[in-house]
Every structure is written in C-alpha cells, then in structure tokens.
Image (cartoon, rainbow, N blue to C red):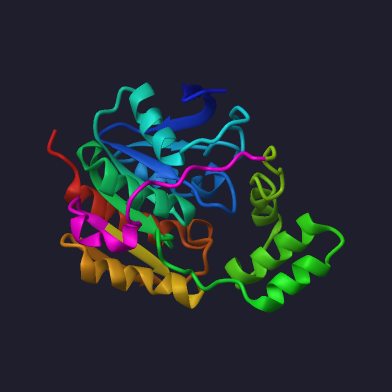
Amino acid sequence: MPSVDVNGARLWYDEAGSGPAVLLLHGGLGDSGLWEPVVPFLAERFRTIRSDLRFYGRSTGPNAPWSWHDDAIGVLDELGIERAALVGLSLGGKLALDIALTHPDRLWAVAGVAPGLGGHDNDAYTEEHEARFEAAEDKTEAMMEIDLEVWAPLGADDRIRQLWRATPDANPLPDGVEPLELPGLPAKERLAELAVPTLIVTASHDPRGMREIGPLVEREAPNARHLELDSDHYVTLREPELLSSVLLEFLTAAAPQE
C-alpha cells in the first residue's frame, strides 16, 4: 500500500497518468474513494494523485494536533512536486482555497467542487437535526442519517454509506486531537488575494449556504469563475463524466506549458 510519511503521519496515496501534477483532496463525508470515478478521466491528461486525509480511510497519525494544510504540502514535497493544481471536494475544497492563499507559489491552479470556505457559514444543519442527534441512543448511526439527509438528498446507496464509515465521524479521534486552524483572517476575508486560476463548482441540491460560495468567490477573486451542476454534494459519484469534462477544460487551460 503506497504511503508517505508527513509530519508524523502516514498518509495513503495513489496516482495515475502523467503530465502536470493534480492533487485531489476529498471531502469530510468519505475518503479518497470519493474521487475514484473521476481519476481515469483526469489521468488521460495529468499526473493525478489522491491521498486520504489524516485520520480518514487508510491514513493514520499520532495523538497530537495537526494541520491538514501542512499535510497536503507535505504530500507534494514527498512526491517531489514543486507545483501542482489542487482540486478539492467539500472539506478538501476549503483546504485547497486556504492553501492557494497561503502557498500560492506551490500551485498553478485551484478548483473547489461543492467546497467549503473559511469564515463562511454553510447553513446546513438545523436545530431539529441537533435535537434528533442529542436524543439518539446510537450517536454514530444518527449522525450518518442526518448527514445523508443534508448532503445526499438524491439518495444514499451502500457505497455512500461505506464512504461515510471511512471518516472520523464513524471512527472518533483520540481525545484532545483536533486539526489546527490557519492563523490570521479566514479565506472569505482574503478572496481578493486569490491570484491563481480558480474554478468553483457548486451543486444545485446543496444547502443554501454552500451554494452561495461559488458566486462569492467569482465576484471577489480576480481570476475565478463559477458554474453549477445539477447534483447533490456527492457530485463526484453522481456526475463523474460531466464533472471531469468541466475540470479537464479548466485544468488544461491553466496548466503550465511543458
């Protein structure tokens, strides 16, 4: 099983294809299996790498605070990649935008697919959701059912449920272990500094707060564009060919000349 040692963690990864490097960062509702249907399309043109975030899927780490941002840069370092495109889904999209602001010299493009945005409320969970969770005897099952109501309104099959079980929500972190937040202003307050070519893909069935992010980034960032696809949050599984076509068009235009 391929892995790299980064900041005390052992991070699983795989790669396919050749060309300019693209690192895929998955979301909080699964591991890098969320990107599996998209990889064959991107690998036709790019060196396509996906890695499980620390404490997701096959990646492990010590009982200590960590930074997912530093881990992503560490993966690039360990693989000898000076510059890459970051393509992030959901949580991974939030991280990709953060990294584009803090390490712009390491990126030639950034794309967020149904991404979060630092400093922006995604407006996803209600008081009713919180009450149901608190009343549930099986907290893990209750959390999964609520998550899938919110993020998979088009339906959840066994594959989606299996992906959810690869997350820290299903496999709780050790007590006191939390990801470190970036210092300074959140990304929402720094979008004018986002200079690398940027694409935001929103999902039409996402919560309202998530759908606000694409237009906001397109309006505030100098080199960004936005489009919406007819999907829920699991867009990489629902529409892999369509999403891949969109990403390939964007990445091919932004890629450095070899």
Observer-nearest of 32 and 27: 27
**For residue 68, above or below residue 207:** above
Quadrant (top left, top right, bottom left, bottom right) of the C terminus: top left
Observer-nearest of 60 and 83: 60
Number of on-image labels: 0
Q: Position of residue 225 (x, y in %)?
A: 24, 65
Observer-nearest of 58 and 159: 58
Asked if residue 183 can be seen in this view, the reply is: yes
Q: Residue at 40% across / 53% down in the picture? A: 93
Q: Is residue 50 magenta?
A: no
Quadrant (top left, top right, bottom left, bottom right) of the N terminus: top right
Q: Residue at 48% across / 62% down in the picture? A: 235
Q: Residue at 22% across / 48% down in the picture? A: 252
Q: Position of residue 40 (x, y in %)?
A: 42, 43
Q: Main secondary structure of the magenta part?
A: loop
Asked if residue 230 can be seen in this view, the reply is: no
Q: Position of residue 220 (x, y in %)?
A: 22, 68
Answer left or right for 92 relative to 152: left
- State the residue lying farthest toward the left: 257
Observer-nearest of 156 and 166: 166
Q: Write down the quadrant of residue 69 in the picture.
A: top left
**For residue 143, above or below residue 127:** above
Q: Write down the quadrant of residue 111 in the picture.
A: bottom left
Answer left or right for 147 relative to 124: right
Q: Is residue 188 magenta?
A: yes
Q: Position of residue 6 (x, y in %)?
A: 46, 25
Q: Residue at 42% across / 73% down in the picture? A: 211
Residue range highlighted in magenta = 176-198
